Image: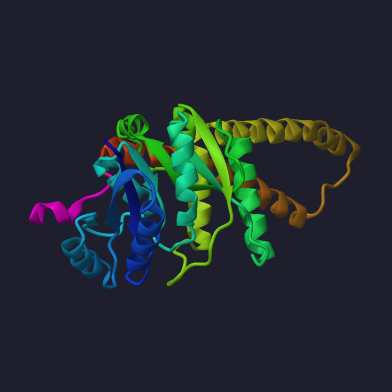
Amino acid sequence: MSRLVSFVIPACNEEKNIPVIIKEIAAVMTDLPYHYHFLFVDDGSSDHTLSVLQKLSKENQQVKYLSLSRNFGHQNALKAGLDHAEGEAVIMMDADLQHPPALIPLLLEKWEEGTDMVYTIRKEQEDLSLLKRKTSALFYDVINNMSDIELEQGTADFRLMDKKVVEAFRQLREHELFIRGLVKWMGFSQAGIAYMPAARFSGASKYTIKKMVRFALQGITSFSTKPLYMAAYLGFSFAFLSVLYIPYIVYSFYQGHTVSGWASIVAAIAFFGGLQLMILGIIGLYLGKLFMQSKNRPHYFIKERSWENE
C-alpha cells in the first residue's frame, strides 16, 4: 500500500496561484507511488482565495482547506496546517510557486532513505537587489551569532517532515513561532537540499522590511538570552569608563581648571540615555514575550474547514 503525503500550503490572497500550484504538484506526483492530498490554510485572505478553495474542494477530493478567523501570520498558518495534517510525510510549501514542485521527488527520496526531515536552502538569485542580498545575509549572520542554533544561509520553510517529527512539533507551545529555528532545535535526522527559487507566479510578497526585522528579533529572542548578556556587559563597561573619569574631575578641581563645555555634557547624557533605553528595550522584548506566553492564547482560530461539509 502506498504511503500518504500531505502538502501543507498557507495562502493569503493567493486566488490566482492556488489552481496553478495544484496542477504543478499533481503533474509531479502522478508518476510517484504515493497517495497525496492538499491542505490549504486560508490565512484571513481579503480576495477570493476562500471561494476558490471552496470550489476546488468540491471538485477534487484531494483538496482540503482550513479557513482561519483572521490573518494570524505565515508561521501560525503553517502550524494550523501541521496540526491537522494526516500524512506519513508532510511537505510545507508556499502557494506562490517560488518553492519549485520539481524538487518534491528528491525530498521524498531522502525521506525514503531514512531522513526524518529534509529542508531546503534557497540560493540567491542573480537579479536580486544588493540590499535584499545584504539584509538576507545579515539576518542569518545575526541569528547564528546571537542564538543557540545554526541555520544555513537561505534556509526556507519549504521542507518535508516525517509524521513523528510533526507529532513532536505539535507539542510545542511557544507563542511567537520561528518554525525554521524550532525544527532545527528539535533534532532528528536532517538533510538540506539547495534550490533556485522560481519567479512568483502572481501577487506580491507579504514580507516587508518591517516584518523581516520583526521575524529576525523573534528568532533571536526565541533561542538565546545573549542579547541580555550583551546589555549587561555594555552597562558594566560604561560604568567602568565613567569611574575612570573621577580622577580627572578631582584633579581639575584642585588645579583650578574650569570644566567647560555644556554641549559635550549634553551629548554624553544623550548618548548614555540612548544606551539605557536600548538596554531597557532588550529587556522589554523578553518581558513582553513572557507576558504574551503567560496568556496561553491559541495560535489561531478556525472559521471553516472543508471536511465539515463531507
Query: Is residue 100 shown left or right of residue 65?
Result: right
162, above or below 84, in the image? above
Q: Nearer the viewer, residue 253 or 176?
A: 176
275, above or below 267, in the image? above
Q: Position of residue 137 (x, y in %)?
A: 65, 50
Query: Is residue 5 shown left or right of residue 160?
Result: left
304, above or below 186, in the image? below
- What residue is shown at x 81% (from left), y 37% (from top)? 249
- What residue is shown at x 45% (from left), y 44% (from top)? 159
Q: Nearer the viewer, residue 18 or 302?
A: 18
Quadrant containing the N terminus is top left
Which quadrant would residue 71 be assigned to in this image? Answer: bottom left
Q: Residue furthest left?
A: 309
Q: Position of residue 166 (x, y in %)?
A: 34, 35
Determine if residue 90 is in view: yes
- What residue is shown at x 77% (from left), y 53% (from top)? 264
Chain part drawn in magenta: 299-310
Q: Position of residue 17 (x, y in %)?
A: 37, 68
Q: Position of residue 293 (x, y in %)?
A: 33, 37
